[in-house]
Image (cartoon, rainbow, N blue to C red):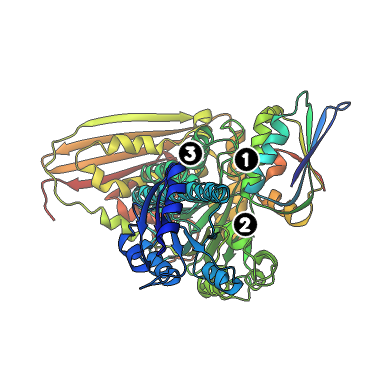
Amino acid sequence: MEQVLTILIADDNPSDRILLKAILSQLGHKVIVAIDGQDAIDKFDPKAIQLVCLDIKMPLKNGWEAALEIQQIAGDLFVPIVFLSGVSDPIALSKCLRIGGIDFISKPYNPALITAKLNAIVKLLVMQKTLEEQRDAMSLYNEQLLHDQEVAKVVYENITHSNCLEDPALATIHYGTQTFNGDVILAAYKPNGGMHLLLGDFTGHGLSAAIGALPLADIFFDWTKKGFLMRQIIPEINARLKSILPANMFCSAVFIDVKVNNNSIEVWNGGLPDLLFFSGSSRQPIRFSSKNLPLGVLSPEAFECQIDPMTFVPGDRLMAFSDGVYEALDLSGEMFCHSVLNPLYQGEIEADRATDWLIEQLRNEGVLENPHDDISCLNIRLDTNIGIDSLERDAPKRHHETPANFSFEYVLYADSLRNTDPLPYVLQILTTVPGLSSFSSQIFMILSELYSNALEHGVLQLNSVKKSSSEGFSQYYAEREQRLSDLVEGYVKISVRVTSDNNQRVLVLYVEDSGSGFDYQKVNYDMSNAELLYNRGLALLDQLCSKLEFSKGGSAVTAHYHWQVGLIN
Amino acid sequence: MVESFFDKKSGCLTIQIEGRFDYSCHKMFKEAFINAVDVTSYDVDLSKVTYLDSSALGMLLLLRDYAGADKANIRLIHANGAVNDILKIANFHRLFVITE
């Protein structure tokens, strides 16, 4: 370890001073001399000098006083101080160490001893220097990393928060262990009213966990906006995550579809703790347990979608949370799911207060100060107007549209009825009509009502009276699945015509099915009977369309939708 | 703590994890199966695991992927209490043979 040091030596005895200088110079070091303590302080430059040797007894300022001032001047820089002493008084020597000296060199000088000590000091300095360099590199790197994370966080939040979480029906808790949160909560209004919600928990924490949220959010928002159904969106998210994430990463999630046209929810749970459904009709919350593997584990071919339906009345609540809540440890070291959460499961906590109550528990048990996992919770107050008001936001503003004139027909037979959903495609064509895109929510609602009526009551011959109880409701959907998978023949024909006459535009939607029709004279268009779980669809259609006509004994229906162009409102 | 034992006769590699099964085991767990040769089946012994988090689930998926995905022959043995609960919530019984 050959290193040339610049050494400051201070000694009032000229012969000792010259002797030490000679020894050190011979070892190859550069030596600066001072004749007393004050002179040493004056000559000390922390940037140039790496080692200071001070005699203890000196005029003006002694070695101890000089040492203290030199240390002050050095500040953060480490400059070792060695005392030179003719005394062997242990008290004096221990004082040298106490005020920050690292060693002594005793007089008379012994060149062999001085050489050995200097080698040790050189080693120490080299080590110190390496440490300082590493520390500086680390703090620079850390600064860079934080900066990068801040930038990425902005992008991340713009993508994952472009949603409707501020809807008054929703309450959320979202705490991350790091800058990035591996949990995501997404909410988006559906074009035909209602809402899609997703609470996801990626493997691990921080940036590596958050990165998977980007494609997830992208598909979630884009496909919801285009009118795809939950059972189409989930497999798409799974396929995308499976193809881009490494094998050991996945996303445990719940997906909730709030359907306002028939007062129901559908829940898909893949790997998250039970969702709790609080309804006025039962004391204990009903649980939706995980029936699926998390997203991004199975290949698209092996992926299945186990979905639980449930009817609700306004005021019922649905609560979902991530592992971070379920597995949080209380003060006694017990997991939340076995201790703190019990009153919630037993129905002893009022559903409206549940979120606040949970935050309180997390705080009381010290989880919020020191979370081991990202913590998220979502609480929805179910109502029939969720996402309905948002429809008005798309209200028409200004139209200077060129006329459109076209028609097309789309017929789906058994296999296609089973495997595809034609609505997003039909809607996509319709929204290319100038001016019509601003009415897309209403048109989507009309289309989806007509289509589900044709499919469920026409082709599948399901009786909607069944839906009047919540039990019957689940049966209804189980039956629907069954009949759809057994279907060998049947069709639904969708016929679309758009015409223009001056400023008047007309969209005619004709939907016909292979079923035996129904007694359409008896339809009650009175919406005031909100308790009715079925038949609300037709009443809604009647309001949205300028004309609704049945034909072919009820197995065909024509809906007329009018709008004007050139208006400014 | 991760320990592994290979039975040459049966071709079964047993990997035992002790204590918390989380990201801190990642390196050892991976080494346990990456370095083994001529393995036809895997037993992951969870009897001494006190806690298992999502990164542990990820490691099990990594092993499954390495061992041939759908063709993998992996048993998770002695999965008790909280460990079994977590495996159940994640529906891992569809991917692995799980025994108590």
Taking A458 as reference, is A538 left or right?
left
Q: Which residue is denoted by mark 3 in the rendering? A: A2
Taking A265 as reference, is A74 left or right?
left
- Quadrant of the image for the C terminus of chain A? bottom left
Residue A168 in sight here: no
Looking at the rendered structure, whether the residues under marks 1 and 2 are on a common chain is answered as yes
* Location of residue A281 in the rendering, given as x and y in whole percent from the top left corner: 60, 70
Q: CA distance from mark 3 to mark 2?
A: 64 Å
Kind of residue sitting beneath label 3: Glu
Chain of the residue that carries numbered disc 3 in the rendered image? A
Q: Nearer the viewer, residue A314 or B88?
A: B88
Chain of the residue that carries numbered disc 2 in the rendered image? A
Asked whether disc 3 touches disc 1, contact meaning CB atoms under 8 Å apart, the reply is no
Which residue of the protein is positioned furthest toward the right in this rendering?
B9
Q: How busy is the neighbourhood of tag 2: few (under 14 within 10 Å), some, or many (20 plus)?
A: many
Looking at the rendered structure, whether the residues under marks 3 and 2 are on a common chain is answered as yes
Rendered view: A355 above or below A425:
below
* Location of residue B100 in the rendering, given as x and y in whole percent from the top left corner: 82, 48
Instruction: Please state the total of marks drawn on the protein image.
Output: 3
The tag on residue A482 is 1
Rendered view: B63 above or below B98:
above
Provide the secondary structure element on which disc 1 rests: helix
Rendered view: A485 above or below A537:
above
Chain of the residue that carries numbered disc 1 in the rendered image? A
Q: Nearer the viewer, residue A41 or A237?
A: A41
Q: Nearer the viewer, mark 1 or mark 2?
A: 2
